[in-house]
Structure formats: structure tokens, C-alpha cells
Amino acid sequence: MAGKVIVCRCEDVTLDDLAHATSLGYAHIEEVKRYTGLGTGPCQGKECMVACALFLARTTGQPPSEGEPFTSRPPIAPVALGTLARDGGEGALPTGRGRGR
Amino acid sequence: MSAPRRPDCAVELDGEAVPAVAGEPVAVSLFAAGVRVLSHSAKYHRPRSFFCLSGHCGACLMRVDGEPNVRACRAPAREGLKVERQNAFPSGKLDLLAATDWLFPRGMDHHTMFTHPRPVNALMQKVVHQLGGLGRLPDRSDPPLGEVHGERVSVDVAIVGGGPAGLSAALACAGEGRRIALFDEGDRAGGSLLCHPAHGPDAGRALADRAAEAGVAIHEGASAFAWYPEDEGGLLAVDDRGTLTRVFARRFVYATGGFDVNALFADNDRPGIFAARAVGALLVRHRVLAGQRPLVLGDSPYAAALADALGAAGCEVTRVDGVSERAVAARGHAWVSALEIEGPAGLRRVKCDAVAVATTPAPASDLPRQHGVRVALSEAAGGFACVVDERGATSVPGVFACGDVCGYRGVDGARAHGEAVGRAVAASLDEER
């Protein structure tokens, strides 16, 4: 029995899972992320996003330069809610709505 | 290895005392004491140790001092520190939930699993809710908020990342009264210098000291975690050792380096398969050998330097370049015992007790991307690299990037690039006068 090739270790997403997702017609990295859960764990895609993007480029035959990352949203590193909540002195908390790519 | 490692305290792992060096990451203490499995993965409950040892990969989440999901590679050891494995049933040593890994050898598609008939679905939802998630709530809540407030930092130049690129940029930019703040997420600045056999912690310290003497405010243990464009014209949010710091600057420089990524082969997540820079950090910074018979996978200059240093430290090193020969599968369950290698001569099995994976680090462009910086994917760059001109200027006015985040270039290349970009940033400020 061949072992699992882990692409996203946080969410245990395998290379087979990526192939399964693309076989169902999901070809954009945001779709694959949502279908498989890749990149949604504690590391937020730091390790797996590139491997997924390159896999999609190979699978769809598109040049890698066409590849897109998925949206980067705050926070990119774990922050205690208490740290955010303690900023009571200067008015509102940061409210960023995660614009950007 | 000059000064050998001497444990001077003991941490407590699931109730058992484990010797440690005060201040070192507790993940290192546990590994050095022979503790192999630190965590179990979320879905298949596969055994895991640390991979990157730099706070990024999320493989070493443990309950530390009653707080869930702490990266054990970021938690400093101290006498009596309580460390517990989580996400395992009935215990961290024996995790029966690992059966899911065997039950679903081809993986599971949770979209179609147990959706019919309805009563089975309802039952499964209950079971899955018990299995899913990581950790339990903290033992105690934070103290009342009181009057503790966040900080505000307003500077001419804010630099994110204190590796060779960021520190060199800070040095090159410093002077003439320019106010420069540098934020590094590590407990000490130095970045990839700290895990390089030819450089090491002393070189990192020396560069950081020079920058500090030149007037750069260096914040260590300060993790820049978000760019909020809507707030006060745009602010960089930094978690500075638990204090929320809002950073405003005329110029931002991203010198965030690269994230370690694994190679793709069967059972590539087995404990003992480390990022090469983690093996380097163990050796150079913490005086711990990753193994007696390590295998170094990769053809980069760093892979060569690491293999040489491991050999000089008395290890029996095997090198596999990953190009003419590539890894196809790992052997061993709770710890790697061998790698199956495929090459022109066919398949061979190399016994080893640790693997150092030296792939090209992926540019850490997540924060610059929040800032709107254009990135481009290329295999040679290691991933989505910030697109910069010859001055290091990105697609966003006032925002610069240097070092590995613009495509992997290694310690020396990152240092040179940081210097050039630091000078360009200084020049761009002078033009405004």
C-alpha cells in the first residue's frame, strides 16, 4: 500500500486529494482550497500553497507564471485575542476587511 | 560544535520530567531528550514532530502552561514548564484515533461521506464534531483588561524581518537622523544566519548589534501579523511580545525571507523528516544532532554546507540531490527509518535516522500581498515572489522588498540585496526633502 503524499500537513490534504478535486472540475486555487481544506490550518498555507499552485499549473497545462496565490488575510501569525482586545486606549480595534490578494 | 549543550532545568511532559536548557525552544528540549512524537495531525492523527523549527509549519502544536495550540518551537523552556500533547485519545502516547489513517488509505472526501441516509449523517456529525478541532480551552482566562493599551510606532522606515536582508537594509539605510524600526518574529534577530554553519548565532548577533549601534530600533519577538489598509490610512499591526503595536511609516520594507517547504513523496510527513534549516538550527544554534545517520535531500549550496557541517560533527551523512535521484517514499512510522530513492540505477533504500529536506524556500509574501504588492509565481524563485524593480521598489508606492521574499537567493545574496535596497530607500527619502 502506497503511503499518503502530504501536501498540507495542517489539514492532512494529500496529492490524491488535489487530483480528486481537479478531476471534479475545480481548477482554481481558491476552489481547490475550499474543496479540500488545503491552506486553512494553523500555518495558513505557508508550506502548501506553492505546491498546490504548481500542481494546478501542471494539471491544467498553464504556465506557472499564470498561477495565483490565494487571498492572504489577517492575521498571518497566531495572535492572542487578549492582545487585540487590550488595545483599548486609542479607539477602535483594527477592522481590516482583508483586502488585497 | 564548540560549547556542548548542558541541560540546566527540567520541563514536565505529560507529567514526566524532561531535562532542558532554559531558554531554548521546548521542542528542542523534547527532541534532545529522545521524545519523538509531539503532536498528532488533525484529520488522520498521523504522528508529527516539528518540521520547520521556526514557528511557521504548525506541526508542533502542544498545550504549554495550560494554553492550547502553542508552537513548541517558539516556547522557551524553563524549570517546571508544563507541556502536554493534545488531540489524541486516550493519551499522547497511545492515540487510537490514528485508526482513521488506516481506514482511509486513499484519503477521505468529507463532502460525500455519510451524507445518506439522514440518521447516519446526524450521528456522524456528532462523532466528527468530537474528533475535529485542536486542543481544549485554556486552564485560565486572561486577567481583566484594565488600563493596558497598545503601542504606536511612527517612523521613517519600518522593516519587517531581521534576517540577512532586513538587517543589511537597516544598516544601509541608517544615518542622518532617519528613524528606522525593525521587527523580527524570532526570539532574536538573525533569521537564516542563525541556522547556517558558515554564519551562526554570533554572526546574527554581530549584524544586529551593528544595526542597533547605527540607531535602528530592533524589536525581537515582534511578529508583524497584518496590514490593515482601512485604519488610519493604513497600518501595520505587530504583536510585540503580547503588546499590540500599530506601526506607521513613510516607507515599508518587507524582508520576510522564505518559508521551508517539504518535498513531495509518500509519507513525507513522518517525524524525523525536517526542513534542512531546522537541522541546521539544531546543529548550529542548539548544539543538537538531528541524527547519527542523517540524509540530506537537495542540491542547493545550503544542502552542501549543512551536509559538510553534519559530517564534521561526526555524523554519517548521505546526500541525495533530489534531481538525478529523488525520494519516492519514507519508511518508519513514529520516526523515519529509511528513504526509498529512485534514480537512473533504479530503486534503492537508504537507511537513515533523520532527513534534512533542502527545497527552495517559498517567498514569505503573505504580508506584502495584504499590502497589495504584486507577486509572481515561478519554480526557480520558490513560489510567489514579490515583484520589484532594481531599487527594490514593489508595485505599491513607498513599499519595498528585499532578500528571499523576492525569490530565493541565500544568505550572501540576501545580504547584498538588502544593502542595495536599503540605500535605495534612503535615497527615496532624501528625494522628498
Image (cartoon, coloured by chain):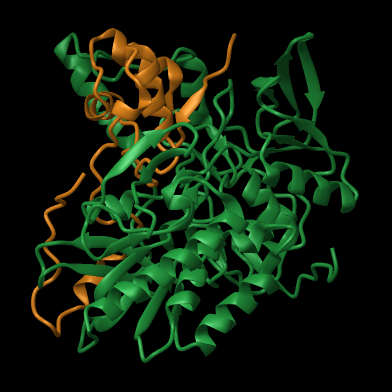
Chain colours: A orange, B green
Left or right of B75, for residue B399 = left
Instruction: Looking at the picture, tell me which residue is in the foreground, B243 or B64.
Output: B243
Q: Quadrant of residue A51?
A: top left
Q: Quadrant of the N terminus of chain B?
A: bottom right
In this view, B41 is above or below B351: below
In this view, B93 is above or below B185: above
Left or right of B79, for residue B54 = left
Instruction: Looking at the picture, tell me which residue is in the foreground, B396 or B367.
Output: B396
Report whether residue B243 is seen: no
* Residue plotted at (74% across, 50% down): B34
Report whether residue B316 is seen: yes
Instruction: Looking at the picture, tell me which residue is in the foreground, B403 or B21.
Output: B403
Residue B138 point in image, percent of width and height: 36, 62
Total residue callouts = 0
Residue B74 point in image, percent of width and height: 52, 62
Q: Quadrant of residue B121?
A: top left
Instruction: Looking at the picture, tell me which residue is in the foreground, B389 or A63.
Output: B389
* Residue plotted at (39% across, 46% down): A43
Residue B428 point in image, percent of width and height: 29, 72
Residue B140 point in image, percent of width and height: 35, 69
Q: Quadrant of residue B178?
A: bottom left
